Image (cartoon, rainbow, N blue to C red):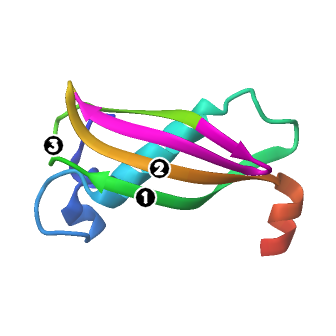
Amino acid sequence: MNVGDADTAIAFRSGEVPVLATPRLVALLEEASVDALAGHLDAGQTTVGMRVQIDHLAPTGIGAEVRATATLDAVEGRRLTFSAEATDDDTPVASATITRVIVDTLRFLERVS
């Protein structure tokens, strides 16, 4: 992703400087974990986020290109654990452990309606 004004700590109200906001970085890392599962779930299944443990390692300014990747490390029943990282060129920006849970999409949506 290319960091824009809407991705900054100022825009997210999580800080007062025009750098990539930690909440936006979390979303990017979660997106990478979802992408890592593409084509691997049964029809009617999806995953939902359960836990994110993140280390935001370096600031990233507007205009920078940030890339996130995630690798599935463990499967425990319906719980999936990923290691994820984000980089700006070759500079580490963040590392995270993400836990997602496999759910039946329709049953999950019925619970929230």
Disc 3 versus disc 1: distance between alpha carbons?
A: 24 Å
Residue 70, numbered label: none
In this view of the protein, can residue 73 be seen by the observer?
Answer: yes
Disc 1 versus disc 2: distance between alpha carbons?
A: 5 Å
Magenta region includes residue 81:
yes
> Taking 79 as reference, is 82 above or below it?
above
Indicate the secondary structure of the residue bearing disc 1: strand
Amino acid type for the residue under numbered disc 3: Ile
The residue carrying mark 1 is: 53
**Front disc: 3 or 1:** 1
Residue found at x 82% / y 53%: 105
The residue carrying mark 3 is: 62
Estimate the x, y position of residue 93 in percent, counting from the top left.
24, 41
Earlier residue among tags 3 and 1:
1
> Taking 3 as reference, is 49 above or below it?
below
Contact check, label 1 and label 2, Cβ < 8 Å:
yes
Quadrant of res 41: top right
**Front disc: 2 or 3:** 2
Amino acid type for the residue under numbered disc 1: Gln
The residue carrying mark 2 is: 97
Earlier residue among tags 2 and 3:
3
Q: Which residues are magenta?
A: 73-88
Earlier residue among tags 1 and 2:
1
**Magenta part, dominant SS:** strand
Indicate the secondary structure of the residue bearing disc 3: loop
Quadrant of res 95: top left
Contact check, label 2 and label 3, Cβ < 8 Å:
no
